[in-house]
């Protein structure tokens, strides 16, 4: 039996058909590049990646999240920025950002407090709410990559609805990760 699970806390959501059309155009335009695309059913905003989490701690984290998150209303937010993380000459992640971030900051503060009560310190790296579209493995044409991001950015401006916070187990596999719900907190 496994002693730990790979876990994270996230906000899953679904995108509108127009967003999926923009995604297909982006994939087609960058077809010659080595990018691992995230499937739409796996879309979420990661609030906190925990990594290997001891199994006895998982129940405590779930309880602290249930007790510590003040239920916000279902929240509809606008996606508005298409960008890339990593060095300019070697980007690692292709992402979409949000117009407003107050909602994420509030949830993140509550999650961090719940995790601290479980003995898990705050993450040292800065938090930036985003949707990962793909992980860049390598690029043949970096100029085309950045031109495509600039040209298609406006097509990704749509709204998404957040209805729950989920504590996930991530099971890595050859076709990408599989997410198993460990705890779910539904919003109002």
Image: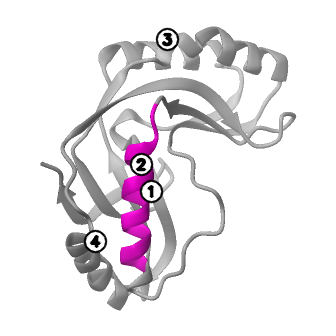
**Residue found at x 44% / y 26%:** 79
**Marks 1, 2: nearer the viewer:** 2
How crowded pointer 4 is (Cα within 10 Å; few <14, some 14-19, many 20+) is rated as: many
First in residue order: circle 1 vs circle 4: 1
The answer to whether 129 appears left or right of 63 in the picture is right
Q: Looking at the magenta stretch, what is its main secondary structure?
A: helix
Q: Percent x, y for residue 146?
A: 75, 20
The answer to whether 58 appears left or right of 73 in the picture is right
How crowded pointer 2 is (Cα within 10 Å; few <14, some 14-19, many 20+) is rated as: some
Cα–Cα span, label 1 and label 4: 12 Å
First in residue order: circle 3 vs circle 2: 2
**Residue found at x 28% / y 71%:** 65
Rendered image coloring scheme:
one colour
> Which region shows up in magenta?
100-115
The answer to whether 174 appears left or right of 34 in the picture is left
Q: Toward the viewer: 102 or 124?
A: 102
């Amino acid at each position: 039996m496994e002693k730990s699970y790979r876990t994270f806390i996230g906000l899953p959501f679904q995108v509108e058909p127009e967003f999926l059309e923009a995604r297909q155009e982006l994939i087609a335009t960058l077809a010659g590049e080595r990018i691992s695309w995230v499937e739409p059913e796996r879309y979420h905003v990661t609030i906190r990646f925990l990594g290997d989490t001891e199994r006895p701690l998982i129940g405590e984290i779930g309880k602290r999240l249930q007790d510590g998150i003040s239920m916000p209303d279902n929240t509809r937010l606008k996606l508005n920025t298409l960008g890339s993380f990593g060095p300019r000459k070697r980007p690692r992640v292709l992402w979409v950002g949000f117009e407003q971030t107050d909602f994420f900051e509030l949830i993140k503060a509550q999650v961090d407090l719940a995790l601290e009560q479980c003995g898990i310190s705050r993450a040292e790296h800065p938090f930036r709410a985003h949707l990962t579209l793909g992980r860049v493995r390598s690029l043949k044409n970096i100029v085309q990559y950045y031109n495509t991001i600039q040209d298609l950015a406006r097509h990704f401006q749509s709204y998404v609805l957040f209805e729950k916070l989920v504590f996930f187990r991530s099971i890595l596999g050859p076709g990408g990760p599989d997410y198993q719900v460990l705890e779910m907190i539904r919003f109002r």
